[in-house]
Image (tube, coloured by chain):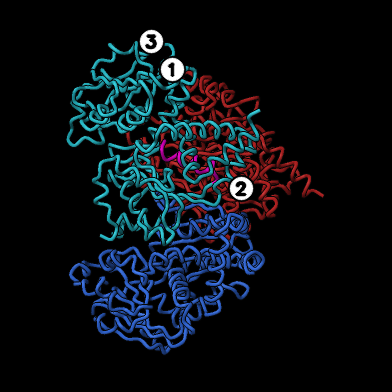
Chain colours: A cyan, B red, C blue
Amino acid sequence: MPYSYKQIISLPLREKLFHFMKNEKIYHVIFAEQFNRDVIDRLCRIADVLRKIAQTREGQDFLRSLLAHKSVMLYFTQPSTRTYLSFVRSCQYLGMNYANVRDPSISSFSKGESDIDGVLTFSNYFDLIIMRHHEGGFAERVAYLMNDSRLKKANIQVPVISGGAGPDEHPTQALLDMYTLCRSFIWRPKKVDGLHIGFMGDVARGRTVRSLSKLLTRFSNIKISYISPQELKIKEDLRKWLDRQRVDYYETDNLNELIKELDVVYVTRIQDEYDTGNESSDLDYSKFHLSIDDVQKMKEEAIIMHPLPRRQELDPNIDFDKRAKYWEQEVNGMWIRASLVAFIFNVDSNILDYYTLHHSH
Amino acid sequence: MPYSYKQIISLPLREKLFHFMKNEKIYHVIFAEQFNRDVIDRLCRIADVLRKIAQTREGQDFLRSLLAHKSVMLYFTQPSTRTYLSFVRSCQYLGMNYANVRDPSISSFSKGESDIDGVLTFSNYFDLIIMRHHEGGFAERVAYLMNDSRLKKANIQVPVISGGAGPDEHPTQALLDMYTLCRSFIWRPKKVDGLHIGFMGDVARGRTVRSLSKLLTRFSNIKISYISPQELKIKEDLRKWLDRQRVDYYETDNLNELIKELDVVYVTRIQDEYDTGNESSDLDYSKFHLSIDDVQKMKEEAIIMHPLPRRQELDPNIDFDKRAKYWEQEVNGMWIRASLVAFIFNVDSNILDYYTLHHSH
Amino acid sequence: MPYSYKQIISLPLREKLFHFMKNEKIYHVIFAEQFNRDVIDRLCRIADVLRKIAQTREGQDFLRSLLAHKSVMLYFTQPSTRTYLSFVRSCQYLGMNYANVRDPSISSFSKGESDIDGVLTFSNYFDLIIMRHHEGGFAERVAYLMNDSRLKKANIQVPVISGGAGPDEHPTQALLDMYTLCRSFIWRPKKVDGLHIGFMGDVARGRTVRSLSKLLTRFSNIKISYISPQELKIKEDLRKWLDRQRVDYYETDNLNELIKELDVVYVTRIQDEYDTGNESSDLDYSKFHLSIDDVQKMKEEAIIMHPLPRRQELDPNIDFDKRAKYWEQEVNGMWIRASLVAFIFNVDSNILDYYTLHHSH
């Protein structure tokens, strides 16, 4: 194969991360582990500023001028509403041109074109590829491909952002969850440090659980509880990561014993699209539904999160409880993604400068 | 259910209309009955002005600046060419950003998300939802949902425009038809008042027939004839409405006895997509086809309308008869929809002011 | 039929070409034969200038202002990646608004609308139609339709560009191939004149082979070799054309005897989507694969082209050989298409003027 990445792809994660950097800065976005505390803080800061600037027409005009010379391919071969639309809106706020491929049957893939050739074509026409692909590690492969020095030379190297990859990775979801925590606990002197987060549901296959757990290790004194059926406990590799990072975590199948202590109840849907047989349908998942009664037992200042979409595990009657933050999570996703795109194209300083000049007095 | 609208939805229409207003102005667009004579006149006036402004590049630049800070979700789960594309062009003329969901299988609905959650997501990301949904009353439900005071408080309340709902309602089609009548009969001293309109074809299930009939009651001395097979006569509720409004209407299955008197022949397609069995295929619909010979019998100043798409009921040889107005109807649809969107976002006065300043001397 | 073109469509090609002109200039783009040497030179020149202007933000801002008042319908009912996306990017560079119909099942065609009515609708809403249709001669028919004087009078006449029609025509692919030749051989005193081009593979059904062969006859002393299996040789009509134009061409099934002489190896995929039975699957196509070993035998200054997508006929290991030009072909396609659209809307002079003013000193 002319595009070799097989060796890199089997490296341990910490040796991989370097490959997603350019000029000592994040370039491709593939794993939540790429974001350290400084980057998280900066991205959250830019997101906060972006949404304030966007409140005026002049502000929006300014934002649309920032990346009017850049273009994006949104390549989503798996269903998506929130991730897709929030990226679209992000790019529109930043004035970017975009196109999408969502149905491979109307593209040349239907004539037997390889995925790699398709992606090289995208990089020929666009300045950024945002992608969700049915093949788990595909975005990672594309990132390595883009690093090929011959592409760099041919001037068709572009950054790649994963919009969710298989059951394992969803780095921008982890970012928006982190951003939601930062905004929700801004009143605490220690902010996110020292929180107790409870993930409830399919913690084995919920990629948001996995990605956010890892980001949380960037903060101090975090306590994590995983509340799930026996059959859907976290997997060995996450357990090892938590041990290595010396995170204080706990596993249970009983929300009740914990609910009064939790600062965050992060509910997740059963991810039966990853069933290999029919295993999920035999499970009694009802113990892992959050009800209005459960919410009554929560701390006054605790919050409820959910990556959405939901099914029965989260009662819509909870929606307007002040602790419910999942609809805000959606909006946060749009702003943190805009922040990330601005960061990758190095216009984040322009945004902060504009804000200093026009708002902060 | 946390979002309650069941009580409202069963109210008589006249008690409902209030719920689609905001600050004493139309906010959601769900029923043709929402448009009174003043609003129709204003929307037609804005549409006339819009198309004149758009004839120059400077004019187009001005229009695109009007709503460059606003965004639209086009959520169409049923096939559409004209309504969809004319709304797209309307929004492009006004400089709006937009995205669409036309294939629910590539969105989170395929993961079991409820329609309501989907729409709440749209309202989180966009400033306006334009929708056509396979479930008849869905746009109406969404409008009530958007009125929920808790959404208002959370600042995610947005207006909803129906782009056609089931067999019953298509308010913007009624508007464009009305606009076509106003433009076509501008030479008459009484304009639309006193016209005799003949609807021919599937008047039972043609939603445009139903919606336009209701709008026509805003005008004086209108006479309506419904020319249809026995099996596809107008339904009881429309008959009741017409009686209550004291409209002079007439039903027949014979175009010939009327054709010399009609000012408007409004032809419609058989709506067999609403067949419950195979009923339409047994019908002899050929009596309700408009031919070149029929057109010869029409008044010189009469007009022919059709909501399109057509099949055999309207001979393409008629297309270039000066009485044929259906291709103009399409274009009128684009301008009246742009007018409506401008009206809802309260930039209609800006448009009239610009016109006064640049054109009318 | 009210729209008559049956007589025209059966005329010999040279008598047809006149019908695609307006004011002595190309208006519709249907056949490669429409481009004479002067037009090819001009389009290549504009494309060269466009890509230079686009290297600066100011340049891009200028380009986006050129056609911001124009709109495009991209109507592609057959799969496409490169042609579709490069047209999208072209239109974005020129600031045009666009919409697409790629899935007829979500448009009114699913309600029994005729293709012609659909296209008339597009011309009502848009200023240009770019189309690829499953019915071979459809774009040609639409072009004649648009010439109907009654449409002209109704002000809904718009230009049509074919984005590939059936197995026969792909005029903009021929243009981008031509542009690639011009750029690749700029170092030769005689440029493209006198080159020896070898087309390898399914030369019977590769529409790019056919279209480019015809364009090449605009140049002097061209030599063409067709290297293909017996079953997939060029067809009688192309052979006749070549004879009439007195082109020096040669047919063989053996690349080896020629490879050292060729200036261009133009590889094509087997077009089995046009199989009527299963004929392609019985063929031994492996003799018509280009390998790294083959490339070693080529002249140092020769080039390798391929219209893409590829399958096995072109080894990805060749991609970064300096002779491989197929990824550049893709990019060239974007610029030559932008050039063509600018040309059709008569803003090509503005582009050259801008360049003279800002770059050439």
Classify 10 Å Cα crowding around label 3: few (below 14), some (14-19), many (20 and above).
Answer: few
Amino acid type of the residue that numbered disc 3 sits on in the rendered structure: Gln
Amino acid type of the residue that numbered disc 1 sits on in the rendered structure: Arg
Question: Toward the viewer: B127 or C195?
Answer: C195
Q: Which residue is mark 2?
A: B93
Q: Earlier in the sequence, mark 3 or mark 1?
A: 3
From what the image shows, is residue A235 above or below residue C42? above
The residue at the point 37 percent across, 12 percent down is: A298
Question: Toward the viewer: A159 or A15?
Answer: A15
Q: What is the spatial separation of the Cα atoms under label 3 and label 1, in whole angstroms?
A: 10 Å
From what the image shows, is residue C140 above or below residue A233? below
The part of the chain drawn in magenta is A82-95
Q: What is the spatial separation of the Cα atoms under label 3 and label 2, in whole angstroms?
A: 50 Å
Q: Which residue is mark 3?
A: A296
Classify 10 Å Cα crowding around label 1: few (below 14), some (14-19), many (20 and above).
Answer: many
- The chain to which mark 3 is attached is A
From what the image shows, is residue C70 above or below residue C361? above
Spot the residue most to the front.
A24
Quarter of the C terminus of chain C within the rendering: bottom right
Q: Is residue A357 visible?
A: yes
Numbered disc 1: secondary structure: loop
The residue at the point 57 percent across, 36 percent down is: A352
- The chain to which mark 2 is attached is B
Q: Which residue is mark 1?
A: A323
Question: Toward the viewer: C106 or A141?
Answer: A141
- In the rendered image, residues at marks 3 and 1 fall on the same chain: yes
Q: Is residue B318 visible?
A: no
- The chain to which mark 1 is attached is A
